[in-house]
Amino acid sequence: MRRPWILPVVLVFGGAVVAAGLLLRGSPAAAVAFLLVFVAFAGVNSPLVFPRSIDWPEAQRRSAVDGRPVVLWRSGCTYCLRLRLRLGLRARQLHWVDIWRDPAGAAAVRAANDGNETVPTVVVAGRPHVNPDPAWVREQLSPSA
């Protein structure tokens, strides 16, 4: 199993176990509600919420061509989720690199953060910015992007 999917799978499994317990106690409505909450929470913490990731060298190449920022992220990171949700539809204009799927991206994050894998790290014009304000990231997108 891939590392980004561990938390969502644990959440769904845990919710299913608790829902089964509630069902056995005679509370089917509570069981369904509880399971739906855990499935929703698993979905939000899954890689499905984020735009499709590319590898670090490709992201650097694309950013050099179109000038768009690169976001180095990982699933399960609340700050990455905050950035993604606050960007809304404009998030698809950025280049996203999942550091748990791309070792070169993870190395780039460690190089920018004194050996730590602190995400999100947004690279704009070759300069890394650690956990920037989403409004600032939106400003970095050109109107024509």
Image (cartoon, grey):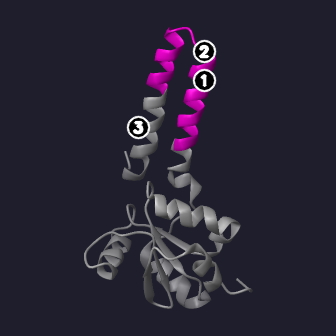
Q: Say above or below: 98 vs 17.
A: below
Q: Nearer the viewer, mark 3 or mark 1?
A: 1
Name the residue beneath numbered marker 2. Answer: 28
> Which is in the foreground here, disc 3 or disc 2?
2
- Can you give x and y, in whole percent of width and height, for residue 18 in the image? 46, 23
Q: Which residue is mark 3?
A: 10
Q: Which SS class for mark 1?
A: helix
Disc 1 to disc 2, how far (Cα)?
6 Å
Q: Examine the residues drawn in magenta and state their main secondary structure.
A: helix
Q: Are marks 1 and 2 in contact (CB under 8 Å)?
A: yes
Q: Nearer the viewer, residue 82 or 63?
A: 82
Q: Is residue 65 left or right of residue 75?
A: right
Would residue 78 be visible to someone looking at this image? yes
What residue is disc 1 on?
A: 32
Residue 102 picture location, percent across and down = 38, 67
Q: Which residues are magenta?
A: 16-41
- Judging depth in this view, the residue of 136 and 76 nearest the camera is 136
Q: Is residue 51 visible?
A: no
List x then y, in percent, for residue 3.
Answer: 36, 51
Separation (CA) of disc 3 from disc 1: 17 Å
Confirm whether the magenta stretch covers residue 115. Answer: no
Q: Which residue appears at 46% of the width and 16% of the height?
A: 21
Q: Which mark is first along the chain, 2 or 3?
A: 3
Total tally of numbered discs in the picture: 3
Q: Is residue 120 above or below residue 8?
A: below
Mark 3–mark 2 distance (CA, rounded to whole Å): 22 Å
Q: Is 114 above or below relative to 45?
A: below
**Mark 3: amino acid:** Val
Q: Amino acid at mark 2?
A: Pro
